[in-house]
């Protein structure tokens, strides 16, 4: 799903983080993180955000639901993880990422754009 455009929204588990969402971005890399079932994805954000004094240009997201993939037609519940150090992406381990909240990932594919146009909603 590399290259897929995503709209990431806050869902639960950390109300102070809700102010940082929603965000849009592009899936730039699929990552196998040792010890975690399922695939994780690096989401490069269109606009960085500040959270607890640090700026974040990308986040790691992974599906919370079995049989649902990030970037599919249906919105997917995801774990949102901060990437405190970009070096962690080279040899990823779960302890290298900071789980910050649950979110919902919406793929912004052609079908979504058409629907948005039909509804008169502006999209990035």
Image: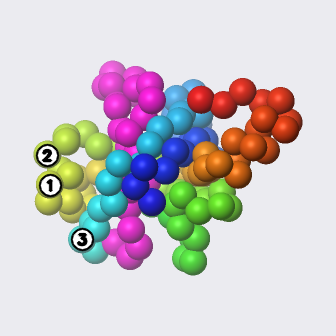
Queried whether the magenta region covers residue 37, the answer comes back as yes
In terms of image quadrants, where is residue 58? Answer: top left
Q: Residue at x 29, y 43 (%)?
A: 83
Q: Residues within 10 Å of mark 1 (few under 14, many from 20)?
A: few
The residue pinned by badge 2 equals 87
Mark drawn on residue 34: 3
Q: Quadrant of the C terminus?
A: top right
> Magenta region's main secondary structure?
strand
Q: Residue at x 21, y 62 (%)?
A: 93
Q: Nearer the viewer, residue 117 or 41?
A: 117
Q: Are marks 2 and 3 in contact (CB under 8 Å)?
A: no
The residue pinned by badge 1 equals 90
SS under mark 3: loop
SS under mark 1: loop
Q: Nearer the viewer, residue 45 or 91?
A: 45
Q: Upstream in the sequence, badge 1 or badge 3? A: 3
SS under mark 2: helix
């Amino acid at each position: 799903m590399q290259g897929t455009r995503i709209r990431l929204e806050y869902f639960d588990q950390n109300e102070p983080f809700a102010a940082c969402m929603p965000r849009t971005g592009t899936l730039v890399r699929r990552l196998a993180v040792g010890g975690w079932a399922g695939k994780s994805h690096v989401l490069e954000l269109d606009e960085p955000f500040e959270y607890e004094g640090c700026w974040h240009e990308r986040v790691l997201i992974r599906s919370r639901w079995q049989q649902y993939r990030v970037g599919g037609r249906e919105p997917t519940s995801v774990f949102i993880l901060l990437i405190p150090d970009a070096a962690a992406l080279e040899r990823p381990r779960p302890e290298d990422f900071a789980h910050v909240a649950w979110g919902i990932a919406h793929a912004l594919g052609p079908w979504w754009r058409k629907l948005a146009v039909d509804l008169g909603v502006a999209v990035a």
